[in-house]
Amino acid sequence: MQESTANKVAAYATSSFTEHLQRERPELLPFMRALPTGAAVTAPLQVPHATTIVAMGYAGGVLMAGDRRATMGNVIASRHIEKVFPADRFSVLGIAGTAGIAIDLTRLFQVELEHYEKIEGTLLSLEGKANRLGAMIRGNLPLAMQGLAVVPLFAGFDTGANAGRLFSYDVTGGRYEEHEHHTVGSGSVFARGALKKLWRPNLTAAEALAVAVEALYDAADDDSATGGPDTVRQLWPVVYTVDSTGTRRVPDEELGAAARAVIEARTIAGREA
């Protein structure tokens, strides 16, 4: 009996963990949990939403940063949420949208990449990772049409091209390669304005960190759903860099110093806007 089960598993083996779940246990997929009929129309769900994510290239890699606030309508649902995660050794994922589904999707994507590496014995290419993430987002389209959308930002180091690359998505799973920098989330329009002024080619990692913190500060200044640096609670953005050595989470000490530098400069300037 055990041998028969093992043979069956081997016969249906796939390098995609998501495909395996779709075939064997579809109810475990985050985007297979349908809302009750009519729920989205008669009583819209009040669930935490995550914003804002910024990402940019710098000399030798890419950087991604996210603020720490999640909102539920006009209420701050959390001041401690993390929105940027390592997808694997050479890529990171930032989430915006319905927080619960986005976090589940992130965990599934992490397992998807780990499963592929174990089955195939090699890392999936960065292009392949971006495509698989797009397929997962497309699977969430029915929930997105009911107001539970997930719109991530994906970045990584392409070991073949020896360069950092950045990808954005829409709710249908459409994948778009971005150049220089990009932002998603409710504060993205304000963060993007800051990036257009502050970003330049061949930034160092330290300079890119300062630009990211300043862009998130600008977003928090004009978007109530985005949380700025909190010096009282010692809460700073979550920031990852990715280069040829892999992913690295920027320590709170560096983030605190960068945030205080921004606050101090603006205090000295004494500007209203």
Image: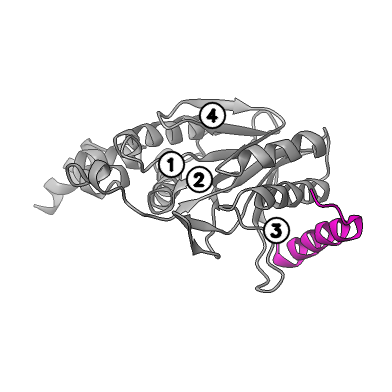
Q: Amino acid at mark 2?
A: Ala
Residue drawn at 77 percent across, 60 percent down: 259
Say above or below: 154 vs 81: above
| Marks 3/4: CA–CA distance | 25 Å
Q: Nearer the viewer, mark 2 or mark 4?
A: 2
| Residue labelled with disc 2 | 96
Q: Tell me the kind of residue under disc 4.
A: Glu
Give the alpha-carbon distance from disc 1 to disc 4, as whole Å.
20 Å
> Which stretch appears magenta?
251-273
Residue 34 seen: no
Residue at the spot of label 1: 150
- Which of the two discs, 1 and 3, sits closer to the camera? 1
Mark 1: few/some/many CA within 10 Å (<14, 14-19, 20+):
many
Q: Which mark is residue 127?
A: 4
Q: Earlier in the sequence, mark 1 or mark 4?
A: 4
Mark 3 surroundings: few (<14), some (14-19) or many (≥20) residues within 10 A: some
Spot the residue most to the bottom.
Answer: 232
Mark 2 and mark 1: Cα distance apart in space: 6 Å
What is the three-letter code of the residue carrying label 1? Val
**What predominant SS class does the magenta segment belong to?**
helix
User: Residue at (50%, 51%) from the top-left corner?
Assistant: 50
